[in-house]
Image: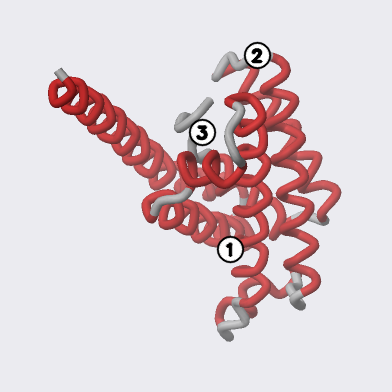
């Protein structure tokens, strides 16, 4: 719904998956984890689960394609970062963000009968959203590197920064909702 699209902490794990796995496997893992997370923990309706799983997998596939097209090499990830060959990472992150936010904005625009541009601006078009998404992609790169260096068990230590990011984002949404409520009340008071 309008203004209620939420930044997904899954972006971090999805981005790490596309850096570690072949595109088809990363897409499958993304879709499956989205279905499990949204059905079991978030209790979203089936059509939203299906939409979110599909659009997340498509975002991962498109981002993986861009990573490869820009010369990314999953077998040399740490070397790429160490030698500042960041174009494949930045390109993949940008494509993931555009496909993901674009798909959600399209669904909101159809559902709420508004322009695609308005839906995108209301849900994703602010500096906080862009910075938060960038932070999640950056964490995704760090998770992928950590996984390569230390294995799956040690990668669980990346969970605390994600919990912190999630808590910060929820706080941001609460403050935004309070400000919008206050603005609405102020407009009603001035009209009276």
First of labels 2, 3 by sequence position: 3
Q: Confirm or deny contact between disc 2 and disc 3 (CB under 8 A).
A: no
First of labels 3, 1 by sequence position: 3
**Looking at the image, is 63 positioned above or below residue 83?**
above
Q: What secondary structure is found at the residue carrying circle 3?
A: loop
Crowd band around label 3 with a 10 angstrom C-alpha radius: few (<14), some (14–19), many (20+): some
Q: How many numbered callouts?
A: 3
Q: What secondary structure is found at the residue carrying circle 1?
A: helix
Say which quarter of the image contains residue 146: bottom right
Q: Which residue is mark 3?
A: 5
**Looking at the image, is 70 positioned above or below residue 110?**
below
Residue toward you, 151 or 23? 23
Q: Give the CA distance from mark 2 to mark 3.
A: 15 Å
Say which quarter of the image contains residue 190: top left
Determine whether, in the image, residue 175 is placed left or right of residue 3: left
Q: Which residue is mark 2?
A: 45
Colour scheme of the picture = secondary structure
Q: Which mark is residue 145?
A: 1
Q: Residue 67 at x, y = what percent?
A: 73, 67
Which-is-in-front pick, marks 2 and 1? 2
Q: Residue 62 at x, y = what percent?
A: 77, 55
**Looking at the image, is 76 positioned above or below residue 9?**
below
Q: Give the CA distance from mark 2 to mark 1.
A: 35 Å
Residue under the image location 69 percent in, 23 percent down = 49
Q: Give the CA distance from mark 3 to mark 1.
A: 29 Å
The extreme front residue here reads 192
Q: Residue 66 at x, y = what percent?
A: 75, 66
Which-is-in-front pick, marks 2 and 3? 3
């Amino acid at each position: 719904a309008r203004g209620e699209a939420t930044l997904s902490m899954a972006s971090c794990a999805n981005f790490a998956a596309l850096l570690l796995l072949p595109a088809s496997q990363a897409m499958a893992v993304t879709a499956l984890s989205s279905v499990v997370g949204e059905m079991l923990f978030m209790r979203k309706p089936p059509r939203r689960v299906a939409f979110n799983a599909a659009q997340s997998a498509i975002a991962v596939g498109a981002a993986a394609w861009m990573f490869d097209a820009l010369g990314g090499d999953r077998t040399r990830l740490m070397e790429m970062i160490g030698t500042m060959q960041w174009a494949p990472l930045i390109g993949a992150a940008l494509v993931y963000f555009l496909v993901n936010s674009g798909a959600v904005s399209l669904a909101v625009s159809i559902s709420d009968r508004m322009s695609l541009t308005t839906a995108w601006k209301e849900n994703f078009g602010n500096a906080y959203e862009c910075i938060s998404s960038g932070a999640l992609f950056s964490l995704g790169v760090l998770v992928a590197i950590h996984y390569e260096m230390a294995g799956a068990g040690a990668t669980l230590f990346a969970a605390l920064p994600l919990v912190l990011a999630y808590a910060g984002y929820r706080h941001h949404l609460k403050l935004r909702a309070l400000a919008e409520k206050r603005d609405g009340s102020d407009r009603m008071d001035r009209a009276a």
